[in-house]
Amino acid sequence: MTTNSAAPEPILAPSLDDAMAFVREHAGEVRFASGELLADHAAGTAAIVRALNVDAPAVAAAALFALAPYLPDPEHMIARHFGDEVGQLVGDVRKLLRLGSVSLRATQAPLPEAGRDALAARRAQVEALRKMLLAFAQDIRVVLIRLASRLQSLRYYAAAKVTPAPAVARETLDIYAPLANRLGIWQLKWELEDLALRFEEPETYRRIARLLDEKRTEREAYVAQAISRLQQELAEAQVSAEVSGRPKHIYSIWRKMRGKELDFSELYDVRAFRVIVPEIKDCYTVLGIVHNLWQPVPKEFDDYISRPKPNGYRSLHTVVIGDDGRAFEVQIRTQEMHRFAEYGVAAHWRYKEAGTRGYGGQFSAGEKYDEKIAWLRQLLAWKDDVSEGEPSAAQTAGPWQQLRQATLDDDHIYVLTPQARVIALPQGATPIDFAYHLHSDLGHRCRGARVDGAMVPLNTALQNGQTVEIVAVKTGGPSRDWLNPQLGYLRSGRARQKVRAWFNAIDLQENIATGRAMVEKTLQREGRTSVNLDQLAAKLGFKTPDDLFLVVGKEEFSLRQVEQALHDAPPPAVHTDTPAQFEKRSSGVSVAHGASTGVLVVGVDALLTQLARCCRPAPPDEIRGFVTRGKGMSVHRSDCPTFLRMATRAPERVLQTTWSADVLNGRGQSVYPVDFLLEANDRQGLLRDISEVFAREKMNVIGVKTQTRRHAALMQFTVEVSSAAQIQRACSLLGEVTGVVRASRKA
């Protein structure tokens, strides 16, 4: 004998009455900070959403979401009473509401730019925030509920004659009214704009409302007469049509008056009516009748039927001159177009196309394919709708092409800085991508990140709406691990390019330094240290010596070719010790590049001199000369160990030498290679920071040797200097670099 277990009883479609009873039971007399009763807000929001013809779960969620903070475990409790779909909607609306404070900060956050740049930056920030709100809410019903909630709040402020915080009106005009517009929900857009203007510009609002009221009787009488006349003509033409006066939108009147610098009496759409017909062909029939009755204004005709707006809006708009010589506007559309104009994207939740005859039938929110088409169509309109400039390709493409473009374009996330600046990043972007987007140097120095206040690994994928704060060191560089795609540190091609550029610059300098040392060693071995390196590089086919050093350092150019070029080169000019010789020196030329050493040899004329590499003497060091076999005289520092050994073995080859008076008095223009020894604690960016010291002091680095032992770095830099003061200053500055333990000239 088997027992049939009872199947779980399905939850019926939630009703608004049940949802409101639940709200009143649990909310009681709870009020918001504005003073509005929570139950009243729930009822008003649900009524607005229901007027948009949205499905029952969305209407129930509109009534319930404000109650969630006052319930224990709200998502499960609401899902148990009203179903999982309503519970999910309520949770998503709550998440979107948490971005409210962010949007308030974003629309008011100070920007460093000034003038037009500041205005452009502000507009870009507001636009990025709108995109973030759309990206954050994957279900369009969540956005509709949020818009309805804001509208209900503004209605309460107006009815209670309570002035909200200035940021509320500004946020409505910057964020929510444009969102309603681009989703095509003009019913909400107009009322949001009018109520926001009422609180942001109360004097302007009252003045326009007063002007509308003063002319209301005259205007209504004229419109009624024009409607009657048009209805008679339509009846004679056997055209079935509904003709009515069009409601006046105070915000659009104010914007036109301000933007076009018009007087109230010059506005066309203060007097207006709308004609609704069954078929598209009837629209053009009515247009012909209207233009036959009244004189049209050519520049004020818009055919949004053959060329719909990017957000799907279709209608005929024309302005004609009435019998009293004043203009008025006429809008002509079908029932289908009017339904879309009133409900916008909400219309797609209740109607879908049935053949070529408009919308027929109903469908529920469970039909994901139709929902996605509606969502992407509006998302495309959102991203391509601009107030100025030429229409984009997406705006003029067919609907399926638009759908494909919208799908491809939906590949960003929107996160925030701690100052509420919105940043657009690729899907899957990490904190390092975020840091490089803000500034290249911040990216290089990034060592950690806080996301919504919690520390996270640097390869964490960011999500829409998160606030990201970068933890950076004062100095440092990127890690090569960041370029490893398997580790997932970088998603942005822009950030990856900046990391590669950093390492390429480091590798470039190291290769040049290595190549210079190799070439100089070859010149020393060949006894041609006085060869002009610019001429040598040109002979070998390079523009500059650095180009030669680079390929040599990368082992892409053989030193044998350098040796061959040296053998083919003319012998170096013999330097004399006469004062006239020093007066002809070029400014700032290295003695290694053929400049005079500035050394005078006592009692000897026309002797080739070269500075010893073992001790690298430079003015005003005490120096001695040692005559070599076939290479002239080698000049050493007096305390050079190598010189002392050679002088002990062959004292007869030692010559008394001194620097020329020009060199000692600072009038010399040659530079001399000097070795600096550094001991430091090894870290990323150490070599770069040391190189920056030499660059700031305008000291040319011609050789680098580094060695690391147990996190201790031993480094030798060969640098061209012009004076002892420059050596002392360099040692002092190098000692201040983070991690450097000791910096001195090589003994």
Image (tube, rainbow, N blue to C red):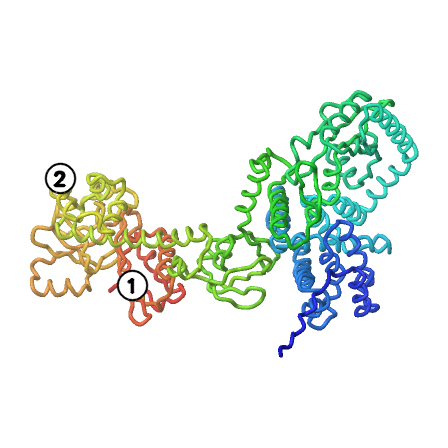
- Residue that lies at the very extreme toward the bottom in this rendered image: 1
Is 329 or 489 nearer to us in this picture?
A: 329
In the displayed structure, 392 sits above or below 633; it is: above
Q: Quadrant of residue 479?
A: bottom left
Q: Quadrant of residue 238?
A: top right
> Circle 2 — which element?
loop
In the displayed structure, 77 sits above or below 204; it is: below
Residue position marked by numbered label 1 in the rendering? 715
Res. 205 mark? none
Residue position marked by numbered label 2 in the rendering? 570
User: Disc 2 residue type?
Assistant: Pro
Which mark is first along the chain, 2 or 1? 2
Q: Residue at x 77, y 53 (%)?
A: 50
Is residue 333 something one can see in this rendering? Answer: yes
Callout 2: few (<14), some (14-19), or many (20+) C-alpha neighbours within 10 Å? few
Is residue 178 something one can see in this rendering? Answer: no
- From the viewer's perspective, tell me whether residue 624 is left or right of residue 174: left
Is 617 or 413 nearer to us in this picture?
A: 413
Whole-number angstrom distance, CA of label 1 to CA of label 2: 37 Å
Foreground mark, 1 or 2, reads 1
Locate the N terminus and report the quarter of the image it occupies: bottom right
x and y percent of residue 142 in the render? 68, 55
Q: Residue at x 34, y 57 (%)?
A: 725
User: Disc 1 residue type?
Assistant: Met
In the displayed structure, 194 sits above or below 465; it is: above
Locate the C terminus and report the quarter of the image it occupies: bottom left
Is 490 or 358 nearer to us in this picture?
A: 358
**Numbered marks: total:** 2
x and y percent of residue 685 in the render? 38, 61
In the displayed structure, 674 sits above or below 547; it is: below
x and y percent of residue 528 in the render? 15, 47
- From the viewer's perspective, tell me whether residue 75 is left or right of residue 240: left
